[in-house]
Amino acid sequence: MSDSVSTETDERLAAAVGQYALGELTMGQAAERAGLSRFELRSTLRASSVELRVGSDDHETAVGELDVVRAVG
C-alpha cells in the first residue's frame, strides 16, 4: 500500500471515528465510511477509548424499534 493510500485510509478512519463520537453517524455508517466492518470499527473505537452508543436516544425511537422486532419475530 502506498503512503498516499495509507494516509487517505487513516484520514477516512479518523473522520468516521470523530463523526461517530460526536453522534453524527451511527456505527454502521461510520464503519462504511471508514471501509471497515462494524466489528472492526467497534474494536477500533474501544481501543481509542471512544464510548460506544448502544440503543436509541429517545423513547419514541425505541418504541418504533421494538415494534419492528415484534413484527419480525
Image (tube, helix red, strand yellow):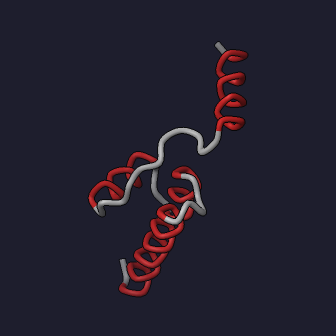
Which quadrant: the N terminus?
bottom left
- Give me the residue at 38% from left, 50% from top: 42
Across and down, in percent, residue 51 comes to 38, 54
Q: Closest to the observer: 28 or 65?
A: 65
- Give me the residue at 43% from left, 73% from top: 14
46 relative position to 25: left or right:
left
Determine the residue located farthest toward the top in the rendered image: 73
Q: Closest to the observer: 5 or 60?
A: 60
46 relative position to 7: left or right:
left
20 relative position to 46: left or right:
right
Q: Closest to the observer: 56 or 30?
A: 56
- Classify 4 as above or below 32: below
Across and down, in percent, residue 64 comes to 72, 30
Across and down, in percent, residue 13 comes to 44, 69
The number of discs equals 0
- Give me the residue at 36% from left, 60% from top: 50
Q: Closest to the observer: 8 or 45?
A: 45
Which quadrant: the C terminus?
top right
Determine the residue located farthest toward the bottom in the rendered image: 4
- Classify 28 as above or below 73: below
Across and down, in percent, residue 5 comes to 44, 80
48 relative position to 54: left or right:
left
Determine the residue located farthest toward the front in the rendered image: 59
Res 68 → quadrant: top right
